[in-house]
Every structure is written in structure tokens, then in C-alpha cells.
Amino acid sequence: MKKILFLALPFLAFHLVALAAAVPFSDESGPLVVKSPNGALSFELIPGDKDLSFTIRAGKLAVVGLSPLRFSLDGASLTEGAVIRDRRQYKLSEKYPWLGVHSTAANEYNGLELRMMHGKMAYTLDIRVFNDGAAFRIVVPGAESDARVPGEATVFNLPGASSLWYHDLVGHYEGVHVKKELSQVQVGEWV
């Protein structure tokens, strides 16, 4: 079975620079769907009155079931009741030499950048779908001197037979990953 990587990357950052291009997604009245370059994987964003929701599919199989996408800043939700003001589709396809298992690395994805509003707060929700994974991030503009507290509460509803590779908070990004079945993950365990 092919491995698929999913990343939720909400953080404060500078605006993206990417190549503008046509990327398929649905019309104004329904969910926004971004497909991978090979069309096998899709990220579906469902705007709602309360929460933004999303699902990720490999073909017709939901590999992340319908889940709320939640982000707050200084204790105030930015995603609850958010409105899409504008959108920009883009894609990237690049290859470059690399040392390691493969001599050439490939970076290929389709993206959708959504300019969002919550009250008077404007921010960007950036979605990228690769052939083997999907990611999103929230970019909130501000000065480097701004002292703000971001809050991440996105839920990932995984199918019951899922396998996870993860580590706890020890060692931060250098932690030792373990593989567990979803049913083996304990309540309150950091994943």
C-alpha cells in the first residue's frame, strides 16, 4: 500500500511566493477541492457557518474523514465563521540534485491560497496537495515585534484501521518515531 503523508502546518510566517497556474477545484457553491498533480489525492475544504471542515481522499477512499480545521490567535478563533474573500490557484513542479536515497529530488504540488476574513482580521489559508501527501498552513500577517499566541485545534479523523508513525514532544523534531495502529494510541498521548 502506498504511504501518504499529511501535515498540518498552521504557523505565523511570511507570505508565499509561488508560480500562478490553473489548478482544478470545484465551483463557488460547493466544497473547494484541490487535486494532486497526478489526480490520485484530493483535499476538500468545506466552508461552514461555524467551522471550516476538510477531508482528504485517495481516489474515493477517505484517508482523513470529515474533520474541523480550527485555528485561534490570542484566544480568538480565526476559522469559526470565516469568510473566503479571494483565492489564487498555483502549482509547482521542480527537480533538483540531492544526496541520499535518490539522486534527484522532486517537488510537485497543486496549491490553493485562500484570503480569509474573520471579523476585521485578514489571513491566508494555504493548501498544497502532492502526489503522496497534503498540507495546509495558516499565515497571519503582522510585525516581528507583535507578541501573539497562536492556537491549533484542528482534528484529524482517521479511519479505525490506520497506522501512525509519530513521536512525542521529547527531542522536538528529532524525536524517535514509532509505528502504532490507531487503536494502540492512548488517550492524552502526544502525537
Image: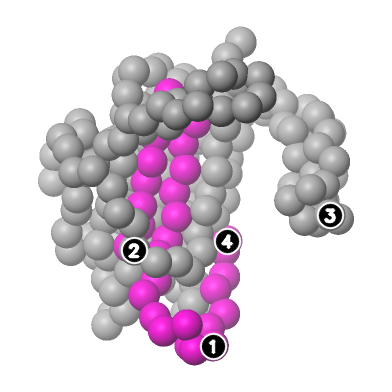
Q: Amino acid at mark 3?
A: Gly
Q: Amino acid at mark 4?
A: Ala
Nearest-to-viewer mark from 2 and 1: 2
The mark nearer the N terminus, 1 or 4, is 1
Per the image, the residue denoted by label 2 is 15
- Report, in whole angstroms, how far the alpha carbon at label 2 lies from the one at label 3: 29 Å
Per the image, the residue denoted by label 4 is 153
Per the image, the residue denoted by label 1 is 147
Nearest-to-viewer mark from 3 and 4: 3
Q: Provide residue 120's location: percent of width, then percent of height.
A: 27, 82
Tell me the magenta residue range.
124-153
Residue 152 forms part of the magenta stretch: yes
Mark 1 residue element: loop
- Report, in whole angstroms, how far the alpha carbon at label 1 lies from the one at label 3: 26 Å
State the residue at coordinates (17%, 59%): 86
Seen in the image, is 83 located left or right of residue 103? Answer: left
- Tell me whether the residue at label 2 lies in contact with that at label 1, contact meaning CB atoms closer than 8 angstroms: no
Residue 168 forms part of the magenta stretch: no
- Report, in whole angstroms, how far the alpha carbon at label 4 lies from the one at label 2: 22 Å
